[in-house]
Image (cartoon, rainbow, N blue to C red):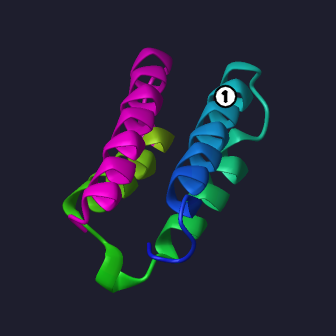
């Protein structure tokens, strides 16, 4: 994503917050699936030219959350947060 300097890191942090919010919704047994769907819809809107292998890994991990038990759900959320950090680093290094 090449828009405004620093926007990528800000967006990644926003997405991390949404993922953490998703975990909280899941733990409180609320409407977490709607939250999950909104995150996926947002990710599907990425420009195809900007999608890297880490993007696809992120989308597939998030898509699988619907079918996971709690312990795997939680660890996958944190894996996705780590992956977002890698995506931000890739962009800083110009490796999209």
Disc 1 target residue: 26
Q: Nearer the viewer, residue 94 or 79?
A: 94
Q: Nearer the viewer, residue 16 or 32?
A: 16
The crowd level at tag 1 (other Cα within 10 Å; few <14, some 14-19, many 20+) is some
The image shows residue 45, relative to residue 79, as above or below, that is below
Let me know if residue 58 is in the magenta part. no
Give how far across and how far down residue 4 sits, in percent.
57, 72
Q: Residue at x 20, y 64 (%)?
A: 95
User: In which quadrant of the rendered view does residue 90 lie?
Assistant: bottom left
Indicate the position of residue 2 as horizontal and vertical percent values: 45, 76
Q: Which residue is painted at 26% across and 54% down in the image?
A: 54
The image position of residue 13, as x and y in percent, is: 59, 44
What is the span of residues highlighted in magenta in the rendered image?
A: 67-96
Above or below residue 14? Residue 52 is below
Asked which secondary structure carries label 1, the reply is: helix
What residue is drawn where x is 53% and y is 66%? Answer: 5
Q: Is residue 11 left or right of residue 50?
A: right
Classify residue 57 as left or right of residue 22.
left
């Amino acid at each position: 994503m090449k828009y405004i300097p620093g926007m990528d890191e800000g967006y990644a942090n926003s997405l991390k917050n949404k993922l953490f919010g998703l975990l909280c919704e899941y733990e409180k047994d609320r409407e977490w699936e709607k939250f999950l769907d909104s995150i996926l819809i947002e990710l599907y809107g990425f420009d195809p030219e900007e999608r890297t292998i880490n993007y696809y890994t992120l989308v597939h991990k998030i898509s699988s959350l619907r079918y996971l038990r709690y312990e795997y759900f939680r660890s996958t959320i944190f894996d996705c947060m780590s992956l977002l950090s890698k995506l931000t680093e890739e962009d800083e290094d110009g490796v999209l």
